[in-house]
Image: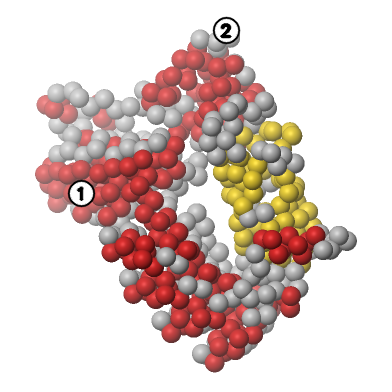
Amino acid sequence: MERKLVQVSDQEVRIDFALNCKCRANVRLTSLCATSPVAFKIQTSSPQKFMVNPPTGLIPPLSYATFQVILKPQTQLPHSYPRSPSDRFLIKTALFPASASPSPPPNPDSVNSWFSSRPNLSTQDHKLKVAFVGPVLLRRAVSLGDCDAARNLIKRQKSVLAGFSAKESESILRVATELADPEGMVNLLLDSGLKIGATEVLEEEEANSRGVDSKWASKGWDELHVAASFDRAEEVLDLVRGRGSGSLNCVDKEGRTPLHVAVAKGHIKCTRVLVESGADKDARSRDGRTALYRAAANGDRSMVGMLIQMGADPTIRNDRGRSALDVARDKRHSEVVEVLERGEEVLMAARRGDTECLELLLKTGAIINYRDLYGLTALHVAAMKGHEDVLAMLVEFGGDLDSRDDEGHSPLHSAVVGGSLEAVVMLVRKGAHVDVENNSKVTPLYMATTMGQREIAEFLISKGASSELSLTTLNL
């Protein structure tokens, strides 16, 4: 049986559909080959609807590459959903001889030319189907009384209903109840987790809220939740002193901590007290949402800015795979998007080699160790592009030389993948560990050797890198 060259992250491209805007989905290709790069080429049956970026590329041994499927702005809803039978993608992969791998790596056009010049090339092909999902289509299916479509949408996005606000939940349920035969659709929505009456109305007289009466107890709240809800910072401090900081992360029936409650209510003072007292800034409720996610969903720019400043992680995703930035964009909270995108701006500046922009961002408090969807930091992307001056600046401002992406690659691995001897030299001189291993136990020297990067390999060996390239260490 022919050995697989790559593993594809998904067998179906799921696109969160929205009208009149570009919709994107990412697909990751992971190389299963330890000795040679793998070339890939993406084709689509619907080029008039979709773009792919990049359409071709090389995957270093035991590393990965990501391409993005982009649906062009559509003025009408899909004729068929979730599955779109007329839309498909084909991923063609082939071994790319290590000796032919240039430094730096080739651009997409040259890889495409390599494929085109070999009409009889033996390739391994992977087919990807397309599915359109998201709340826009779910609302449409409900309004049409199409239980099958609604069920299949929810099946592909199990937490889609969890992303609805109380108002949105009540609206879609009202539409379902007005159908000619509402029972099936209503039961489907409720059984799938639609929450009705989930909005806490806490405007009752404060005298009735002292302690934990039956109303709050039914939610699973304790005294800290109630105090946080009414922004009673002094009471929170008294409770923490009496019960210890461990009580700060107690959860209610929805998995929400007092910090979630304070943030959802927009209580800046109480939020600050909770965080400074030791509350977990990145605690996730049952639906995977952090306090920062809730602040972003509410469009609370001040709260988002404060949480970011206090160290909350903006890259954590909820159970639907959505980050705080995603929800802010979805709800068009432009000021919140601006705050959250500063981390992405650092990555973009590092990728471009724009030291002037990068220095301005870092001097004004932008997050230097921000990670993208795949765990890449500014150091990773600057190393891959060979931007020595950017690397020097990032290290000077405290960039983490030992940071790892989701595959365990360090910035030094990235510099090798990019084929930049200068970047490799810079990182090693700044203190990067030459024998660092990724999740597959691959060192920078092993990568350099298999990719034919002789100068880089010789430099790493001169700096003490182990030349033991035993395949047994790679579990092969």
The answer to whether 117 appears left or right of 275 in the picture is: right
Q: Residue at x 55, y 39 (%)?
A: 22
Residue 46 lies left or right of residue 302; in this view the side is right
Q: Which residue is mark 1?
A: 272
Q: Position of residue 401 (x, y in %)?
A: 42, 73
Left or right, 441 with respect to 125, comes to: left
Q: Quadrant of the C terminus?
A: bottom right
Q: Residue furthest bottom?
A: 462
Looking at marks 2 and 1 on the same chain, the residue that comes earlier in the sequence is marked by 2
Residue farthest toward the top in the current orientation of the protein: 180
Q: Is residue 85 above or below residue 362?
A: above
Which numbered disc covers residue 180? 2
The residue tagged with tag 2: helix, strand or loop?
loop
- Taking 247 as reference, is 72 above or below it? above
Which residue is nearer to you in this view: 239 or 352? 352
Mark 1: few/some/many CA within 10 Å (<14, 14-19, 20+):
some
The residues bearing labels 2 and 1 have C-alpha atoms spaced at a distance of 50 Å
Taking depth in this image into account, of 221 and 294 the one nearest to the observer is 294
